[in-house]
Image (spheres, grey):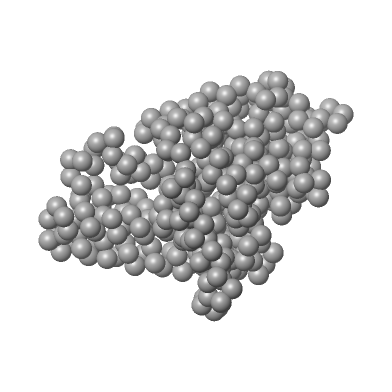
Amino acid sequence: MDLTHTDEEEEFRARLREWLAATLPTLPGRPDPLDWPARRAYDCGWQRRLYDAGYADVHWDASPTQRLIFLEETELAGAPYVGANFVGLLHAGPTIAAEGTPEQRDRWLPPVLRGDEVWCQGFSEPDAGSDLASLRTRAVRDGDAYVVSGQKIWTSHAEVADWCELLVRTDAGPGVSKHRGISWLAMPMDAPGVTVRPLRTLAGSTEFAEVFLDEVRVPVENRVGEENDGWRVTMVTLSFERGTAFVGEVVACRRLLGELARAARENGTWDDPALRRRLGRLSAEFQALWRLTQANVSEAQATGGVPGAGGSVFKLHYSHARQELYEAAAGVLGPDALDLGHDWTLDRLSSLSYTIAAGTSQIQRNIVAERILGLPKGR
């Protein structure tokens, strides 16, 4: 695989750098990171600027190399991340682009790209987390609508979302495998019967919520894919979530590692050879993850745009490397690592969830064992 950049790609980088340099100083001040309504407005405002400048669809329609250049340059420039719009832009949007009808793509994709509509993810349930196929939220067909009842938990950005990518059970008949009988629906969050209860995280944020569904009517035309084929569509969503959604964060971790090394030199902890070895190993780990990212994105482009099982390799290693980065930061910062007003502290608390979010590390190991190494499934 040739990872060198063409003249056209370098021109793309130069134009993007120039635009970022001119645009970022004009942005309003960033809102309180724990105020998600304010963050939604800020994040969607940034998405609109990207749209007006012609960069909004870089995650979907650009070449793999341009996509990585975009992520590198925006992160290095300190540009806002997708934030509240991440489910629509990185999960639901790509799934609809890959699996939706032309009418569904026309309805839902432009508002995501413009920052007009925000999506949340309604997958996990109290008794269906890692074993997602055990979900029990029911959808009963009634004419041209499904009547949905059940409960979702850890629903990302539900309190500020317009739409939910929702997994439901449409066939619970005897003898039906738990992986069958599932459908993928786009549910409007303002529909009667939807109740959202925010969940407060260890860091004090409320980007997750419980969602209760009491006979919510969802039009049949909002189903993406065929009825009872939702597990296959879900695998497409999870491939994007594990394979490409964390790409920008690898660049961020490489930048943060450099900041940590500078802080260690300033406060004297750099004199510890064990710390230097740890930071050096982390630097190599994140460089390797970036190369793996390049390979995964290129493979996805060559095979129709959907990331493969290699995304699980990336997600598994990235989750643990990110946690170790913040453990190393605690050693460098000392007592300051306990200050909740410190960005490093909030990031460290957030990193604790990464070995659970988007599929636990145990699930990723199973995927790697079965789909890449060809090992037999456990009994």
Q: Position of residue 183 (x, y in %)?
A: 73, 41
* Camera-side residue of 139 and 77: 77
Q: Residue at x 24, y 36 (%)?
A: 339
Asked whether, in this view, residue 98 is left or right of residue 326, the answer is right
Q: Residue 98's spot in the image, x, y percent?
A: 71, 54
Outermost right residue? 143
Number of numbered discs visible in the structure rendering: 0
Q: Going by the image, does 198 lie left or right of 305?
A: left
Q: As displayed, is residue 287 above or below residue 199? A: below
Q: Position of residue 18 (x, y in %)?
A: 49, 60
Residue drawn at point x = 41 percent, y = 52 percent: 78
Q: Nearer the viewer, residue 112 or 148?
A: 112
Which image quarter is the N terminus in? Answer: bottom right
Could you tell me if residue 47 is visible in this image? yes
Of 211 and 116, nearer the camera is 116
Residue 90 seen in the figure: no
Quadrant for residue 63, please give it.
bottom right
Left/right placement of residue 73 relative to residue 174 reads left
338 above or below 368? above
Q: Report x, y in % for residue 363.
A: 51, 51
The residue at the point 52 percent across, 40 percent down is 43
Q: Is residue 330 above or below residue 374?
A: above
Q: Observer-nearest residue: 128 or 108?
A: 108
